[in-house]
Every structure is written in C-alpha cells, then in structure tokens.
Image: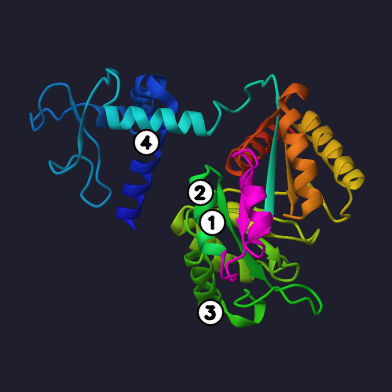
Amino acid sequence: MPRHADLAFAVVLLLALALGGSSAATGLPALLLSLFPSGMMAAEARGEYPAGMVALPLFDRGLHSRFAPQVLFPVTSHGYPAWLEARRQIAAHAFGGVTVFSPRRTIAVAIVLDDMGNDATQAARAIALPHQVTLSFLPYPDATPELARRAERAGHEVIVHVPMEAIGNQDPGPMALRVSLGPVENARRLDWALARVPGYVGVNNHMGSRFTEDQAALVPIAERLADRHLFFFDSKTTPDSRVVEVAHAFGVASAGRDIFLDDVQSEQAISTELDELEAIARHEGVAIAIGHPHAVTLDVLTRWTRDAAARGVELVPLDVAIRMKTERAVSVAYNGGQ
C-alpha cells in the first residue's frame, strides 16, 4: 500500500507539471509546505543532506530516512526538458486550453457515432467527417479492427462500444456483459472487447439498460477501466443508470450523453435534435450527442459540422467534453449549486 501511495503522489505531481506549465513548477514549494510540516522541509542538523536539499519522507521508513528522495528547495523553474515540454504542449492542445472556471467564447459540442463496424461503406463516410467526431466500434464485427485503425489514422478518437445486458429480450450481441455472469467473466469479456478495437481511449455501453443500473455489476468494470486509464462514457439507455457515479468513485472519467440524434431517421428530426443539442451547450457550455452511421445521419452531420464554427459552435472530441462536464459539475458544487 505505501508503494501505491508513493506512486499516486508521483503521478499527480508529474501531471500537474505537464498540464500546469511553469506556474505549476513555481508553485511546488507551496505545495510541499502544505503537505509536510515545516520541520520536515529543512535538512537535519546532523548534516545528512547537502545545503539546499530537502528529503521527502518515505511512508515506510520514518520521516528523515537517508534513502528518501531528495529535491532542491526552494524550487526554481528553468523550463522543461524537450520530451516533457512536448507532452505538456500536446496535453494543452488536446484539452483545447480548457481550464476550470475559464470563460469560453464558443460553446463546445461533442458528437459520438456508435454501432460502428457493421457497414464499411457508411464507416468510410463517418471517417471522412471532421476528426473531432468520436467513433465508437462494436467489438464483434469482422471489419472492426481494420476500420478502427483507419479511423485512428484519420485522427478520430476511437472508443469501444461494449455490449451490455438490456432490459427485456433485446440481444446486445455476442460476449455481452451480464449481471448474472459475475465479475471474473465480465472482466474477461471486457478484455476481449478491448482487444478487438485498436487505438481505443475509452468505452461506452451498447444497450445495457439492465447492466448499467446494477451498481455491483459496474464496480469490477470501473476497476478494470481505472487500471487501464480509460474513460467510461454513459450512453444513458436508462434514466436509472449508475455509470457516472460508480466510475467517479474509482477515479474513472465519465459523463452521460445529452441527446440521441437519430431515434427518428429523418433529416428534419435529426436537425431538430441538433438544434436542441446547441441549446443545451449554450446553457451549460458543453453538450454531447450520440448518433449512428445511418445514411441520413451522415448527410445531416456533413452539413452541420461544416457550418458549426460560423454559429459559434466548437466541435470537440469526447474526452474533452467529458472533462468539461466534470469541471462544470465541480464548479456548480463549489458555488453551492449556482
């Protein structure tokens, strides 16, 4: 357990440096002072450590072990090595410069097309959409691995559309996660689904109205996703879904969709849903829609994405929208529900 705590602290520290820029580095002394008593921030009088060095405590060796990691104190920022600076810039670009409580001149919308993999022709049209559109692939179609690779090469965010048990007699497809199977078998089926989709960065549920209502069934799935550093996007096939709360309990990034675009497959109906999506985004700053690679959906989305920027809509990948939704929830809680 102590090793896990050490590792968690190191990961948080590195992420803060990678995402926070030079301001994170210059704030490190304050962080150290807030975490450790002042007596621990000076070298021992016995002279075990060179001047200007601080020994961070090891949880299993006492407060001032000579084997503890040592850092210069106070910390002065002199920029980052090239490899770290490159990753910091990539992270900043990937998140669109979004920070908590920062106003945006545009509204953010994410579009997810799932049920990908069954139709190569429509998949090619989906892949031709702007790369910010996230594509979710069913694991069981034969064409899925190659189509997912094409999508990734085109710059799309790829996720796995994991089959999960539905209420009633609907069949989610082979290797579906089921409440009755138990954690070991469901974890095996999840691993199989992930192995079928190259380049994945997260998952969402295919059907799953029964499975996503069951907290006990979701817990081992959330644990598995946490181990793999994946997000869990909730398709919200039931109003009683527990996905987001269980995922967050295990540190898994998660949010639910706002709109289904094409329950009714007509241009007018899909355009109406896109108008509603924009209205939600203008009110909340960000909104997420799910659609499918139907010909009519792709026709409407081809036009809509072309004109989105002119309407002040910024199309963002799903992981960015999930992050923004999480930040908004934190902001609302921080401000007492306002």
* Residue 40, image x, y percentages: 25, 32
**Looking at the image, is 221 positioned above or below residue 252?**
below
Residue 108 numbered tag:
none
- Please, what secondary structure does the residue beneath circle 1 have? helix
- Is there CB contact under 8 Å for labels 2 and 1? yes
Mark 4 or mark 3, earlier in chain: 4
- Please, what secondary structure does the residue beneath circle 3 have? helix
Which of the two marks, 2 or 3, is nearer to us in this view? 2
User: Is 134 contained in the magenta span?
Assistant: yes
- Label 4: which residue? 13
- Label 3: which residue? 185
Question: Which is nearer the eye, 40 or 131?
Answer: 131
Q: From mark 1 to mark 4, how far is it between C-alphas?
A: 33 Å
Give the residue at x 66% y 57%: 121
- Amino acid residing under circle 3: Glu
Residues drawn in magenta: 114-143
Q: From mark 2 to mark 1, how far is it between C-alphas?
A: 6 Å
Q: Quadrant of the N terminus?
A: bottom left
- Is there CB contact under 8 Å for labels 4 and 2? no
How dense is the environment of label 1, judged by Cα within 10 Å: few (below 14), some, or many (20 and up)?
Answer: many
How dense is the environment of label 4, judged by Cα within 10 Å: few (below 14), some, or many (20 and up)?
Answer: some
Question: Which is nearer the eye, 169 or 300?
Answer: 300
Which of the two marks, 4 or 3, is nearer to us in this view? 3
- Label 2: which residue? 152
**Looking at the image, is 314 positioned above or below residue 8?**
above
Mark 4 or mark 2, earlier in chain: 4
